[in-house]
Image: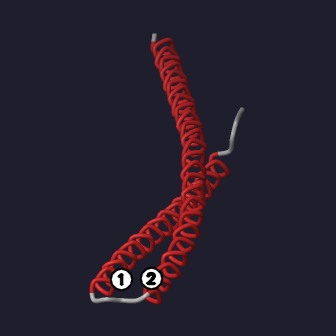
Amino acid sequence: MTVEPFRLARVLDLRGRLRALRRLEAEEAGAACEALVAQSEALRVERERALGALAAAVQDGGDASVVALAARFEEAVRGRRTALGVRLADARVRLAERRTALARERREERKLEHLAERHRARADAEAARTAERLIDELAASRHATERGERDRGE
């Protein structure tokens, strides 16, 4: 299979751009995961702070309304944690998909690079054969010319 060098170079360039896009998408998915993990951590810290405040209120003689408020808060936090967990799981799936796509693009790009290298090697070999053939023809022509001059000189 022969591939035109210009066309192959263009395909390689486009593949490189596509891989760069996939890498950017993977980085964005990774950043989204990190942001969700940070939100989850902030929620955990907020929950611990609220539970500490609840414990202090109960020790200071808080009534049932404080406990009811804490229960509603805990339920709201649980709901937010669940939602964050789902979003984080989805983000991790997207990240894995982006990384897989990036690896696939890189494999395809390597195949094309290998094809380009084989094409260059064949072109170099053909150029070397052409040069050798021209040198041989030049040597044969020179030899014939020298022989003709010798024959005329005798």
Residue 120, numbered circle? none
Comparing 21 with 151, the one in front is 21
Image quarter where the N terminus lies is top right
Q: Any mark on residue 67, and which?
A: 2
**Residue placed most toward the observer, 112 or 89:** 89
Observer-nearest of 154 and 134: 134
Residue under the point 52% across and 65% down: 24
In the figure, 120 relative to 149: above or below? Answer: below
> Does residue 37 appear to the left or right of 115 in the view shown?
left
Quadrant hosting residue 88? bottom right
Q: Determine crowd level at label 1: few under 14, some 14-19, many 20+ residues with C-alpha closer than 10 A.
A: some
Most extreme residue toward the right is 1
Contact, mark 1 vs mark 2 (Cβ under 8 Å):
yes
Q: Which residue is mark 1?
A: 54
**Amino acid type of the residue that numbered disc 2 sits on in the rendered structure:** Val
Mark nearer the viewer, 1 or 2: 2
Q: Quadrant of residue 34?
A: bottom left
| Residue 124 position in % (x across, y down) | 51, 34
The relative height of residue 40 versus residue 154 in the rendered view (above or below) is below
Q: CA distance from mark 1 to mark 2?
A: 8 Å
Q: Please determine whether, in this image, residue 53 is positioned above or below residue 14.
A: below
How many numbered dots are placed on residues in this image?
2
